[in-house]
Amino acid sequence: MFHPEGPSLKELAIQAMSSTTRGYDLLAPKFEHTPFRTPDDLLAPMAQAVGPDGSVEAALDICCGTGAAMRWLRPKCTSHVTGIDLSAGMLEEADRQVNAADGTAEVRLAQENAMDMPFRAEFDVVTCNGAFGHILEPDQDTFAHGVHRALKPGGRFMFITRQMPGVTNPTWWAYRGFNAVMHVRNFVYKPPFIMFYLTFTVDRAREVLERNGFSVEFRAPYSGRFAPARLCIATRKE
Ligand SMILES: C[S@@+](CC[C@H](N)C(=O)[O-])C[C@H]1O[C@@H](n2cnc3c(N)ncnc32)[C@H](O)[C@@H]1O
């Protein structure tokens, strides 16, 4: 549908009627060829903001998928780069892709829930991209608290989001339309597929992160079709 090597419309429909995790297990072999994989043009400025190669000891990518961000993070780390995801299929792809990437940091992958991470003050940098739609708004504080706990004091949580578009912007209608379809799908069909757009945009992310112990900065290093994107750098205060 998106790319000759990507999933067909029929495959996408089957995935959308599965649970979130099963859907990603099915999508995993073709995920790199879908628009759901965060593009390198978005990840490169985030990696640049992390610092030069070898500038941090350890980094974590939450909801790592096939390891798109981990490939950028690995050369930055002197010790290890860790990825967590609920989907075993996505982790299998990440294992292949990240071990073949630049850098010598140990690659650690674990099937863990972003809402209940086992890490304590372990990472200099934590990232999460393309996955806030899977975290329902009432769960965002729990998520932010887990990220805070996983970071060393002074560590940075970095991710890409966008400003909430105005209601006159067609993007607002496209995403809200998608969300409405998802609500209907989850109402009439189980298991649910949790995926909603525009849930962790700039103002909302700032509010949630500030009340969970972060100082928050947004940068705008993007242009062209990615101009609305913002890079968030949220630093753990203590
Ligand atoms: C759209 S993909 C994004 C993957 C990758 N971060 C990227 O940007 O290319 C979302 C990923 O989040 C994972 N995921 C969803 N909910 C999760 C949860 N509660 N804990 C861990 N992983 C989760 C899915 O399995 C999937 O691999």
Image: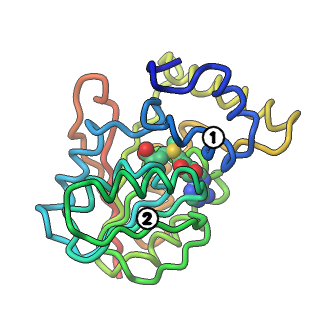
Q: Quarter-wise, where is residue 222 in the image? A: top left
Q: List the residue tagged with mark 1.
A: 26
Please tell me whether mark 1 sits on a helix, a strand or a loop.
Answer: helix
The residues bearing labels 2 and 1 have C-alpha atoms spaced at a distance of: 37 Å
Q: Quarter-wise, where is residue 185 in the image? A: top right
Kind of residue sitting beneath label 1: Leu
* Residue in the picture at 47% in, 35% down: 164
Neighbours of disc 1 within 10 Å: few (<14), some (14-19), many (20+): some
Residue 55 position, x and y percent, is 15, 70
Please tell me whether mark 2 sits on a helix, a strand or a loop.
Answer: helix
Residue 170 appears left or right of 156: right
Q: Which mark is residue 210?
A: 2
Specify which label sits upstream in the sequence, 2 or 1: 1
Residue 69 versus residue 226 in the image, above or below: below
Q: Does the residue labelled 2 lie within 8 Å of ligand 1?
A: no
* Residue in the picture at 54% in, 42% down: 28
- Viewer-proximal residue among 29 and 17: 29
Residue 55 appears left or right of 158: left
Residue 5 position, x and y percent, is 46, 25
Residue 1 appears left or right of 70: right
